[in-house]
């Protein structure tokens, strides 16, 4: 469950500190900061720590069985508390939330989870980027992982008996694996890049799309969506007037539909599915809807008012206009839709 804490720490927080913004461009500031652990901790604790929980609660965290694999589920933080330990120069993050993941047999597994993790935070001011590291110091409590619902009713019965340890182990592997990894956030003028583990300058996280220019990258990943499933990408924030989300897609597998929804509408829909509701249309009309065909890159510019939004990708016969090919063994053998995408925030007047 490392992921719940990770992606939200794609902090714009270090950008909030003027000294860091200056430090990236000025060696006279950058070198003394890099050479002083005490100064780096002071900067983080005074200018960055207060943004950890607010940023965490804005976003979901992708879940992967392999750090370099496709996303197969997501965790959505619901609560967060933070404690600073100046003497030890550590930060303890207590968090809880809900999420879902997919398996070939069980279908959609929904869960709740909470943990408390102590990290040693540090950063490095490079020539073109700020590297922020969270290294796991110790797991204070948890992770506590509880299955809320399982789509396949036979497996659902098993999950609530001693035989069901397999489903709990699946969730535990995701959660514990992420917790043990630590993470790195690479902050640049064009956005934040996140990866599990500890990478050093000038390394960059692996991404499916190359990006450049003035737009701010909010997500850049590959997700795997099985037949009769949906995935909630985001939420994505539009924080100023005259802005748009610029989205690029590349799909391998069947065509899928994409729905743009207000965060409140999508959270209500997602919560119902996580409690075991049968997949059906969202509780409110989408702001926009379009089909993504396989085989070539597609682009969408989405001018939106200030707010938070989800981009829901649908690979089912129950929501959008596209219907996956029928397969009586779809849960086991059907080909998933593998969707690589990047979401950037920029000026709505820009060409795309």
Image: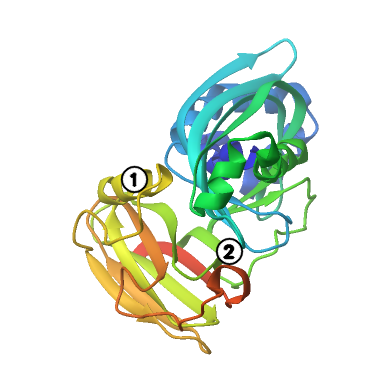
Mark positioned earlier in the residue sequence (2 or 1): 2
Q: Residue at x 43, y 54 (%)?
A: 234
Q: Quadrant of residue 143?
A: top right
Q: Secondary structure at mark 1?
A: helix
Residue 275 place in picture, x, y as percent: 40, 42
Query: Which residue is at the front of the view, 341 or 246?
Result: 341
Packing grade of label 1 (10 A; few <14, some 14-19, many >=20) is some
Location of the C terminus by quadrant is bottom left
- Give the number of marks: 2
Packing grade of label 2 (10 A; few <14, some 14-19, many >=20) is some
Residue that numbered label 1 is attached to: 272
Query: Which residue is at the front of the view, 93 or 72?
Result: 72
Q: Residue at x 58, y 36 (%)?
A: 160
| Colouring | rainbow
Residue 114 place in picture, x, y as percent: 57, 28
Query: Which residue is at the front of the view, 164 or 115?
Result: 164
Q: Residue at x 72, y 33 (%)?
A: 33
Q: Residue at x 68, y 52 (%)?
A: 195
Q: CA distance from mark 2 to mark 1?
A: 26 Å
Residue that numbered label 2 is attached to: 221
Location of the N terminus by quadrant is top right
Q: Quadrant of residue 317?
A: bottom left
Residue 257 place in picture, x, y as percent: 37, 74
Quick check: 83 left or right of 241? right
| Residue 176 is at least partly visible in this image | yes
Q: Secondary structure at mark 2?
A: strand
Please, is residue 43 above or below residue 31 in the view? Answer: above
């Amino acid at each position: 469950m490392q992921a719940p804490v990770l992606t939200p720490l794609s902090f714009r927080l270090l950008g909030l500190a003027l000294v860091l913004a200056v430090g990236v461009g000025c060696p006279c500031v950058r070198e003394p900061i890099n050479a002083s652990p005490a100064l780096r901790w002071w900067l983080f604790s005074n200018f960055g720590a207060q943004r950890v929980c607010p940023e965490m609660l804005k976003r979901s965290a992708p879940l992967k069985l392999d750090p370099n694999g496709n996303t197969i589920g997501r965790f959505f933080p619901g609560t967060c508390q933070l404690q600073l330990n100046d003497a030890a120069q550590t930060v303890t993050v207590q968090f809880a939330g809900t999420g879902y993941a997919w398996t070939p047999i069980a279908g959609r597994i929904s869960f709740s989870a909470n943990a408390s993790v102590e990290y040693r935070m540090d950063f490095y001011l490079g020539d073109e980027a700020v590297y922020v590291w969270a290294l796991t110091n110790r797991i204070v409590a948890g992770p506590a992982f509880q299955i809320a619902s399982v789509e396949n009713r036979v497996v659902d019965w098993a999950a609530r008996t001693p035989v069901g340890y397999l489903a709990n182990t699946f969730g535990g592997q995701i959660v514990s694996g992420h917790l043990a990894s630590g993470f790195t956030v690479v902050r640049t003028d064009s956005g934040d890049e996140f990866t599990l583990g500890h990478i050093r300058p000038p390394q960059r996280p692996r991404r499916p799309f190359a990006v450049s220019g003035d737009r701010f990258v909010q997500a850049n990943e590959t997700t795997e969506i099985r037949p009769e499933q949906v995935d909630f990408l985001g939420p994505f924030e539009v924080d100023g007037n005259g802005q748009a989300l610029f989205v690029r897609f590349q799909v391998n597998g069947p065509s899928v539909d994409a729905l743009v929804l207000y965060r409140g509408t999508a959270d209500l829909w997602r919560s119902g599915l996580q409690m075991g509701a049968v997949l059906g249309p969202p509780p409110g009309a989408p702001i926009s809807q379009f089909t993504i065909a396989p085989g070539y890159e597609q682009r969408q510019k989405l001018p939106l008012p200030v707010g938070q939004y989800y981009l829901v990708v649908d690979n089912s016969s129950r929501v959008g206009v596209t219907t996956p090919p029928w397969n009586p063994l779809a849960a086991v053998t059907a080909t998933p839709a593998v969707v690589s995408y990047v979401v950037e925030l920029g000026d709505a007047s820009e060409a795309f």
